[in-house]
Amino acid sequence: MRVTITSNVHEMSVQAAQMVRDEVRRKPNATLLLPTGGTPLGMYRELTRMHSQEGLTFAEVTTFNLDEYVGLPPGHPGSYRRYMEENFFRHIDIDPANTHVLDGTGSNLEKACLDYEQRIREAGGIDLAVLGIGHNGHVAFVEPPAAVRAWTHVAALARSTREANARFFHSLADVPRAALTVGLGTILGCRRVLLLASGIEKADAVTRAIEGPVHAMCPGSALQLHPDVTVIMDQAAASRLQLREH
Ligand code: F6R
């Protein structure tokens, strides 16, 4: 694991965007696995700036998203399809046909999960996955206890996850109780992984993920099993690290 500690969240976002930019320049038809939430917002802003000011093109890029709520149609303000459109896709030159977000409204969710894995395979696998981390150590919506050999599936959301995401809804009651999410197997199958964390409220989770034992109760700790992981976090998130060699 390569661990970079930045002086603030802005710097975390800029460095994350640079890593995505370098991947897309190296391989213009790269396939990315992308997160939503608060953590990557600055990275999407910086990538948008690189597109408009530096000519970074996403014309041949394919994206998949980590997860989507069950029951929210794509246009719903809380849906992750809507988040991606508003915070990233509509500001860049990506072909909408190359953007994939799980659909949590279908009648056969199990099949939607199998189809998603199939589409990832058909795209040639994921070149770079970008992840945030939840307070309870979740990555994507893989909640503890997590199975390492799991692919895209329907997941019940932990109460702490619903509480953390209530800020994107009118109230906690409006936050869906389930989501479709890629699994740890999907993530460990990606060629490279970038984990982002910012703020003191992530300090425990990220410390357990990168310095604790690999444990089902901290899904992010499975990243220790991956050969090519970069972690970029701000000083607040890094404040509880022992700073062992990674
Ligand atoms: C979002 C996702 C989640 C978030 C995590 C952190 O697509 O997969 O794992 O990355 O819940 O969320 P924020 O960044 O809002 O703190």
Image: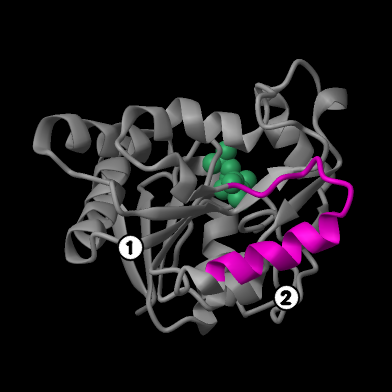
Q: Is residue 121 left or right of residue 197?
A: right
Could you tell me which secondary element the residue under label 1 belongs to? loop
Q: Amino acid at mark 1?
A: Ala
Q: Amino acid at mark 2?
A: Ala
Does residue 137 lie above or below 199 as drawn?
Answer: below
Report if residue 113 lies within the magenta region.
Answer: yes
Report if residue 202 lies within the magenta region.
Answer: no
Tell me the magenta residue range. Answer: 101-120
Depth check: 57 or 134 in front? Answer: 57
Could you tell me which secondary element the residue under label 2 belongs to? loop
Does residue 10 lie above or below 206 as drawn?
Answer: above
Residue 138, by quadrant, is bottom right
Query: In the image, which is nearer the foreground, mark 2 or mark 1?
Result: 1
Indicate which disc, 2 or 1, sits on the residue closer to the N terminus: 1
* Quadrant where the image shows the C terminus: bottom left
Depth check: 205 or 53 in front? Answer: 53
Which percent across, then down, holds residue 22? 20, 59
Q: Is residue 80 left or right of residue 236?
A: right
Hey, which residue is sitting farthest top in the picture? 170
The residue shown at (18%, 43%) is: 56
Hey, which residue is sitting farthest left in the picture? 54
Dot 2, crowdedness within 10 Å: few (<14), some or many (≥20)?
some
The residue shown at (53%, 83%) is: 225
Q: Which residue lies under the disc numbered 1?
A: 30
